[in-house]
Amino acid sequence: MRRQALFWLVFLAAAVAAWSATRALPTAARAFTVFLLVPLPPLTWWQARLAEAAPEAVSRRALYLSSAVALWGLAAATVMAARASAIPPDVLGIRPVPLGAAIGWAAGATVTGLAVLVLARALNVRETRTVAYLIPVTPREKVGFAFLSLTAGVTEELVFRGFLLSALQRAAGSLLPALLATSLVFGLLHAYQSSSGALRATLLGALLAAPVVATGSIYPAMAAHAAIDLVSGLILAPYLVDR
């Protein structure tokens, strides 16, 4: 009971602090930003704890599909919050970028991101039971995993490096605190990968923000994110994950 009371006290304090800190945002964008910062991380952590108990209870393909549906739903909510707040698409990073710059930044972020994963494995970072189970085995599972990887690349970049980064930068009046907060939240949402995995995701979140900051577009980050997931899950998995 005491732990639950402490949790709700911290939760409410964080929600109030986040609401106060985002007063510069329109109401819809403000509410959605607070949702991303406060309720979403513990909700994701709770779901991860349930999955960690018995991940084999649900088929991999069902997990891929349900995760993709949830991510597209979150992306749809992002678009609705932006429209309700009259935030134009270019503020979210939905803008064209020269092909050379797009390829260069996407390739650079992909290689660096994969290097982070390989380095983490070399430092003996172990994947959780849930992550190991999510690695596809059959051809159909690999197709489902590829779809989920592409979905994550598009939706998570829209939500975090598109909407949340720009919203927090407007609220804070500075890029650095927005970048730090966005990367931290992104890491917390990957708590199912263990504490060291969440730290790794935080670093990857900061890395994926680099192309957005440099080009003003989320497209290179989307491509890099999807490529990192695809390569790590379909090619590097035997090295990265102990089965």
Image (tube, helix red, strand yellow):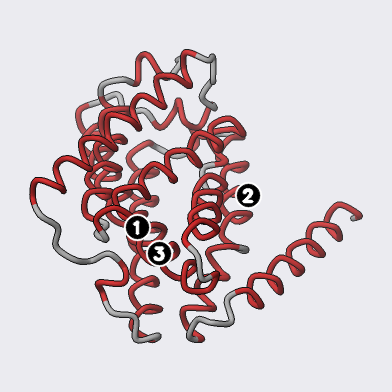
N-terminal of the two: label 3 or label 2? Answer: 2
The residue most toward the left is 99
Dot 1: element: helix
- Write the residue at 24% across / 32% down: 142
Element assignment for label 3: helix
Q: Residue at x 19, y 66 (%)?
A: 95
- Quarter placement of the N terminus: bottom right
Q: To which residue does mark 1 refer?
A: 69
Distance between the alpha carbons at the discs numbered 1 and 3: 9 Å
At label 3, the amino acid type is Leu
Locate residue 93 relative to residue 59 in the image: left or right: left
Q: Which residue is mark 3?
A: 74
Mark seen at residue 46: 2
In this view, the residue in front, 96 or 141, is 96
Question: Pointer 1: residues within 10 angstroms few (<14), some, or many (20+)?
Answer: some
Quick check: 197 left or right of 107? right
**Label 2: few (<14), some (14–19) or many (≥20) C-alpha neighbours in 10 Å:** some
Rate crowding at label 3 as few (under 14), some (14 to 19) or many (20 or more) other CA atoms within 10 Å: some
Could you give the CA–CA distance between mark 3 and mark 2, rounded to whole angstroms?
17 Å
Quarter of the image for residue 137 reads top left
Q: Residue at x 57, y 41 (%)?
A: 191
